[in-house]
Image (tube, rainbow, N blue to C red):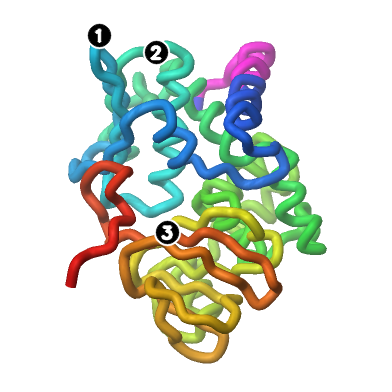
Amino acid sequence: MRLLPRALAANVVKLALRERVLSGYPIDKPCDIYRLVAEHVTLQFIDVPTLEGMYLEDADLRRICVCAVRPSGRQRLTSAHEFGHLLMGHGTRLDLIEEARNQADENSIEETLANVFAYHILMPARAVHTGFTLRHLDPKRPTPREVYAVANWLGVGYTTLVQHMRFSLELLTSDLQAKLLRKNLKSLKSAIVGRETAHDVFELDALWNDCTLHTEIGDYVLGVGTGEYRILSPAGPGVHRVSACGSSKVRLESGATLQVHAARSNYVGFYDYRYLEEAN
Ligand SMILES: [Zn+2]
């Protein structure tokens, strides 16, 4: 990623934090980026595997499109990135997946600005600190499981949070960064849930109170209290599996409550219909 002049980067960070606060998300809490984006512009999930996402703008249309077949944290980062292009007036953008990108795209100043915006609207320094310290964890010495839990809470991918903690927030040494990046995520998720899985595994604790969790069918959630939920099925002691599309207010063992949205895997269509319950 191209290095930006410090003042320019600081202005983009300020823009991201301002947008967050104006939308009602304190800088020490997670931000529901899909809701925030969908309040400003049409948000759509598309089946174009060579694109991370795109921002379309002409006289009578403004739309953000996100690739439907990318990991969930990457999809949220892309939504934030495209929203950055919109707010900064960059005009229509097509963002290819990493493998299809060339050096020129990579080094474009507007691409770097959109990345800085995305990182800071999703992971402000205060929210990262809070995510660790209120869980009584040390952000300078996290284990892979702790990073994964905080990444889920912030709604970003594991690797994205590790890189942000190393390069933007300077919390991690290069040795610890390398060690965290070597962790096999599939085996981490399987170990947490006690069975083989490549799906996301959310450990829901009291800090999730009043948050929104976006899941896909097949994901696992831990920490749900007693009660029956249409979108969740019991899957072992303390474990539920997301089993149907829809939205439910869920009460946790800790007494906290949160909104859980469940979508079909690789959902294609408008965000507004993503969590519609399916007729049997
Ligand atoms: Zn872009």
Q: Amino acid at mark 1?
A: Ala
Q: Quadrant of residue 204?
A: bottom right
Q: Which mark is residue 162?
A: none
Mark 2, ligand 1, within 8 Å: the answer is yes
Please report whichever mark, 3 or 2, sits nearer to the chain's N-terminal start. Answer: 2
Relative image position of residue 67 (x, y in whole percent): 28, 43
* Residue linked to disc 3: 261
Q: Is residue 13 visible?
A: yes
Counting from the top left corner in percent of width and height, residue 23 is at: 58, 31
Q: Which mark is residue 59?
A: 1
Q: Residue at x 56, y 85 (%)?
A: 238
Residue 4: image quadrant is top right
Asked if residue 277 lies left or right of residue 34, the reply is left
- Residue type, mark 3 in image: His
Amino acid identity at mark 2: His
Residue at figure coordinates x 28%, y 16% from the top left: 57
Would you say the residues marked 3 and 2 are in contact, meaning their CB atoms lie under 8 Å apart? Answer: no
Q: Is 142 inside the magenta-drawn segment?
A: no
Q: CA distance from mark 3 to mark 2?
A: 31 Å
Q: Label 2 belongs to which residue?
A: 90
- Bin the neighbour count of mark 3 within 10 Å (Cα to Cα): few under 14, some 14-19, many 20 and up: many
Q: Secondary structure beneath disc 3? A: strand
Q: Which label sits in the foreground, 2 or 1?
A: 1
Q: Is residue 91 above or below residue 209?
A: above
Lower sequence index among marks 3 and 1: 1
Q: What stretch of residues is rendered in magenta?
A: 2-12
Query: Where does the C terminus fall, quadrant-wise?
Result: bottom left
Q: Work out how far the residue at label 3 is from the one at label 1, CA to CA, in angstroms.
A: 33 Å
